[in-house]
Image (tube, rainbow, N blue to C red):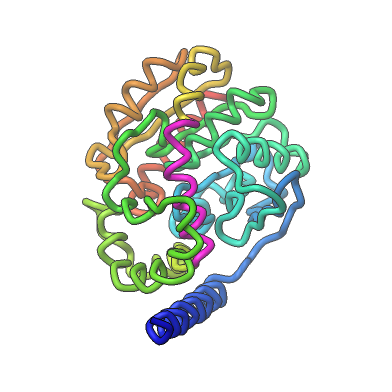
Amino acid sequence: MLIPLGLLGVLVLGLAGWSAYVGRKAEEMVPAEGAFAAVPGARLHYVDLNPEAEGPAIVMVHGLMGQLRNFSHSFAGRLAADHRVILVDRPGWGHSLLDGPRPGIAAQAGMIAALIEQLGLEKPLLVGHSMGGAVSLALGLDRPELVRGLALIAPLTQVVETVPPPFKGLLAPPALRPLLAWTVAVPVGLRKGPETAAAIFAPDPVPADFALAGGGALALRPKSYMAGSFEIQAAPAEMAALVPRYGEMRVPVAILYGRADAVLDPALNGEKTAAEIPGATLELIEGGHMLPVTHAEATEAWLRGVLARLG
């Protein structure tokens, strides 16, 4: 019995070493490119585009298993031509670091609010994609005085009982999460990465340069698996607390969805939510879940329309 246990220990150590190596390589390929801000509970990595621009600033918050290059790949530069655009790695994602317990949706909203205050932004437009949409909604409810409005792209806005198929691998029991993150998560992620990306982007194609220019490689790290596993399992309870408050929303909310989104249901997370939030608007366009990457021009046109309406 001692020999199999010894071999198991060697296997676990080998997988952990390999996972650490892959994680380091991913960070070398997709390095930090911005500045860092210390906020309560985290050290946030952000990129500040065109900081001297006049007019309202735009803060962009990415989704699950993502990071700020999800926006800079195709989309953010279009807005940065005439706006200040701040892209943020959410706490625990990308190159942002945690200083305490792993934060949920509401706690992350507080950290993004602290960044807005620290940068001295005057009522920016908050743009949230996917899980970043849920964080944006929490911020809009808790700190409405900080933002001029919310522009939500394929956002998570409701309690989703069934985990989307591309993320089912994140359903690890909390006690096993670190072990899986440091042993099998990275090798499985490498093997199934193209298949998972295709499912998230469907029906749109995955750009050939997404791993680097879009930051996709950073999902292949033990820390990303642990963050994703935590968020996907904590989200239902957090959304259950958030949804009943939608009638209290006092900032304008605009929602954009792709009609063929294969990750989140546009009827549930778009139509239902737009009906529950006073004055909220919903626009549907052709495309899937990763609209800022695959339909950047149409997403820009929608967002500029939101800015024009807000004045």
Q: Answer left or right for 171 relative to 213.
A: left
Rendered-image quadrant of the C terminus: top right
Q: How many circles with numbers are drawn on the protein?
A: 0
Q: Position of residue 162 (x, y in %)?
A: 29, 38
Front-most of residues 248 and 50: 248
Residue 87 visible at all: no
Q: Residue at x 41, y 36 (%)?
A: 155
Q: Is residue 84 magenta?
A: no
In the image, residue 254 above or below residue 26: above
Residue 226 is inside the magenta segment: yes
Q: Main secondary structure of the magenta part?
A: helix
Magenta extent: 222-238
Q: Residue at x 45, y 25 (%)?
A: 240
* Left/right of residue 14 with respect to residue 1 in the rendered view: right
The x and y percentages for residue 259 are: 24, 37
Q: Is residue 267 left or right of residue 126?
A: left
| Quadrant of the image occupied by residue 2 | bottom left
Q: Position of residue 10 (x, y in %)?
A: 46, 84
Q: Which part of the image, by quadrant, shows the N terminus?
A: bottom left
Residue placed at 45% from the left, 77% from the top? 12
Give the vertical position of 95 relative to 109 (above or below): below
Task: Say left or right for 243 vs 191.
Answer: right
Residue at 51% across / 73% down in the picture?
Answer: 23
**Residue 122 vertical placement versus 99 (above, below):** above
- Can residue 204 be seen from the camera position used here? yes
Which of the two residues, 122 or 50, is positioned nearer the viewer here?
122
From the top left corner, tell me how far across and down residue 105 is, in percent.
55, 37
Who is closer to the viewer here, 5 or 289?
5
